Image: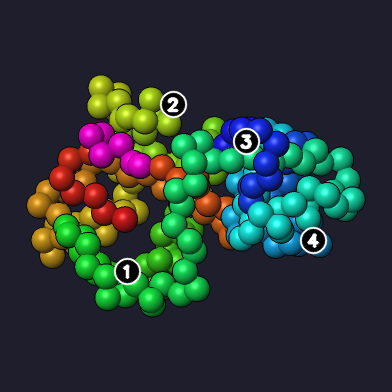
């Protein structure tokens, strides 16, 4: 995000005195904003600055003009590079028939029991909170400042709890070789990421999500 050019209002709001360092969460920010308008996305900063995006400019204007925000300092913001985010669909079923070249969707690849075990194993490990969301890296770490993977520095092998999953991907020919890098991102309700293009040159031909 950045300060908008001129003084025109936008649907994005800069929120000072608000962030993880101050104990704020996506839920608490959404609840507080919701007294005026419910944000469609909340970006919780690690320090004391966060952002909220609303469905319309009018909703953002109502929040900025409101008196319910306490010690928050509110200003309009805009997405760097301009508005490029696709509108949020009411249901992903509306895109179920869309075909994307090179994309293979495998339904129910993980059982509910496997998913529960994976979540427990993930939460038992240390999270990295240096970006706007919590992440874990295995194999090689993705450097968010350079948008690259440092292939010269390993951060350890892939954890044992994903061995069966990765092995099944290879056995079922979803990937031609075993995977050597894993990034786990936590997206809690209300938190998203800004419009961006992934650095594809940091990876080889196959990526599993």
Q: How is the image coloured?
A: rainbow
Please check the rendered image and state whether residue 201 is part of the magenta-colored stretch, yes or no.
yes
* Mark 3, residue position: 4
104 to the left or right of 154: left
**Secondary structure of residue under mark 2:** loop
Nearer the viewer's eye, disc 3 or disc 4? 3
Task: Examine the image and state in which quarter residue 156 appears.
Answer: top left
- Which residue shows up at 25% across the image and 34% down it? 202
Q: Quadrant of the C terminus?
A: bottom left
Residue 69 location, x and y as percent? 84, 49
* Mark 4, residue position: 36
Q: Which mark is first along the chain, 4 or 1?
A: 4
Q: Which residues are magenta?
A: 197-202
Pointer 3 with pointer 2, Cβ within 8 A = no
Q: Measure how far apart labels 3 and 4 are at the Cα level.
A: 22 Å
Q: Measure how far apart labels 2 and 4 are at the Cα level.
A: 35 Å
* Mark 1, residue position: 110
**Secondary structure of residue under mark 4:** loop
**Secondary structure of residue under mark 1:** loop
Nearer the viewer's eye, disc 1 or disc 4? 4
Residue 71 location, x and y as percent? 86, 40
Residue 161 location, x and y as percent? 34, 54
Nearer the viewer's eye, disc 3 or disc 1? 3
Q: Which mark is first along the chain, 1 or 3?
A: 3
* Mark 2, residue position: 145
Q: Measure how far apart labels 3 and 2 are at the Cα level.
A: 23 Å
Q: Which mark is first along the chain, 4 or 3?
A: 3
Q: Quadrant of the N terminus?
A: top right
Which numbered dot is residue 69?
A: none
State the residue in front, 92 or 136.
Answer: 92
Label 4 neighbour load within 10 Å: few <14, some 14-19, many 20+: some
């Amino acid at each position: 995000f950045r300060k908008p050019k001129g003084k025109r209002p936008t649907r994005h709001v800069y929120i000072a005195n608000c962030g993880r360092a101050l104990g704020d969460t996506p839920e608490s920010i959404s609840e507080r904003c919701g007294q005026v308008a419910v944000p469609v996305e909340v970006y919780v900063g690690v320090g004391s600055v966060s952002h909220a995006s609303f469905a319309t400019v009018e909703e953002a204007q109502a929040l900025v003009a409101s008196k319910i925000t306490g010690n928050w300092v509110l200003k309009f913001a805009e997405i760097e590079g301009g508005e490029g985010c696709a509108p949020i669909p009411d249901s992903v079923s509306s895109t179920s028939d869309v075909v994307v070249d090179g994309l293979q969707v495998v339904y129910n690849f993980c059982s509910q029991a496997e998913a529960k075990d994976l979540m427990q194993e993930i939460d038992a490990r240390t999270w990295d909170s240096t970006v706007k969301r919590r992440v874990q890296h295995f194999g090689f770490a993705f450097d968010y400042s350079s948008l690259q993977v440092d292939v010269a520095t390993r951060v350890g092998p892939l954890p044992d709890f994903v061995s069966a999953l990765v092995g099944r991907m290879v056995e079922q020919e979803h990937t031609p070789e075993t995977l050597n890098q894993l990034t786990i991102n936590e997206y809690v309700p209300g938190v998203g990421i800004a419009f961006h293009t992934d650095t594809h040159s940091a990876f080889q031909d196959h990526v599993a999500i």
